[in-house]
Amino acid sequence: MTVVGPFGLSVRDQALEADVQAGLAAVEEGLLEATKSEVPFITEAAQHLVRAGGKRFRPLLVMLAAQFGDPHAPGVVPSAVVVELTHLATLYHDDVMDEADVRRGVPSANTRWGNSVAVLTGDFLFARASHILADLGPEAVRIQAEAFERLVTGQILETAGPRDGRDPVDHYLDVIAGKTGSLIAVSGRFGAMMSGADETVVDVLTQYGERLGVAFQLADDVLDIASDSHESGKTPGTDLREGIPTLPVLHLRAQAAQYGRPDDLALCELLDGDLTDDARHAEALARLRVHPALEQARRDTVRYAEDARAALAPLPECDAKAALVELCDAVVHRAG
């Protein structure tokens, strides 16, 4: 048994392992090439997060999806570079919006160079992704444009908040389907499509990616509260400190509104206060870690991961399918 990609995903077939490892290595080279500029400072800023590492979850999904066609087809690696560049670009922008100090264990670009440079660097990465995408054909351009529209719409919906009368949890699930699920769905779609897989397979892997993407984000929500060492390189409780609503907090607020339990109301009041204070932040984290809302968020994560697994049913049994199933298990494992 060998290990590749994020979460220590195990791949038992040597040929599959070789394809995936070679593909991910080519993606890494492609990322470094795509982030080069004639201006050294732009290269430094654009490669800041590339060199910081990361799970490369989206390129891994592209490589596994490509196994259902020709994994060595010329569009496979470039499409993986496109989705990862797009993801990286959104991180630069997210860190500005969230005023984040750390990303992937290193100082965020906005902390190091300021908000203007971080935003413009994200724009530079979008431009480079578009340049690569243009060579993949008009259908790929359309797919990426639609996904990017969904991604931005999700971000806007998050900023605007739920409209009057809308369930905040339902609103939040729509937000992350756009912000996270859309690009992971494209990863599965591009991998299958660029490899020449059957259209039915392309549809299956698109649905799988969408559902897995939501599970992936929900696992991050749980980790933000439950973990001592956040896999993304962020400090535990970062979203909590910054007042970003995540699923465990939304479940807590729903329970407080429905049942009116004094402890729940007091915890909501604590969360509404100044969590930049270390003592208050630590107390909020400790209380959330033992609250039923956290377990409820874990169950939601498992449900979406199981939906992703179920989407794979029409695919033929093979090592690539087994690896995709294991990705579902790995996402659930991250959430505890």
Image: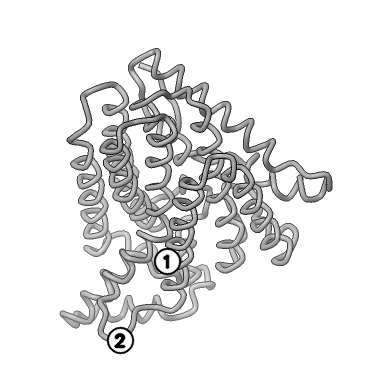
Judge left or right: residue 239 versus residue 324: right
Place of residue 41 in the rendered image (x, y in percent of width and height, measured from the top left): 81, 50
Q: Amino acid at mark 2?
A: Asp
Q: The C terminus is located in which quarter?
A: top left
Which one is in front, 17 or 145?
Answer: 145
At 44% from the left and 34% from the top, the residue drawn is 194
Identify residue for label 2: 164
Q: Is residue 71 above or below residue 173?
A: above
At 67% from the left and 63% from the top, the residue drawn is 119
Mark 1 element type: helix
Which one is in front, 168 or 122?
Answer: 122
Mark 2 element type: loop
Indicate the colouring scheme. one colour
Q: Residues within 10 Å of mark 2 (few under 14, many from 20)?
A: few
At 56% from the left and 26% from the top, the residue drawn is 25
Identify residue for label 1: 154
Place of residue 113 in the rendered image (x, y in percent of width and height, measured from the top left): 75, 59
Q: Which mark is residue 91?
A: none
Q: Is residue 3 above or below residue 326?
A: above
Quarter residue 15 falls in: top left
* Mark 2 / mark 1, whichever is N-terminal: 1
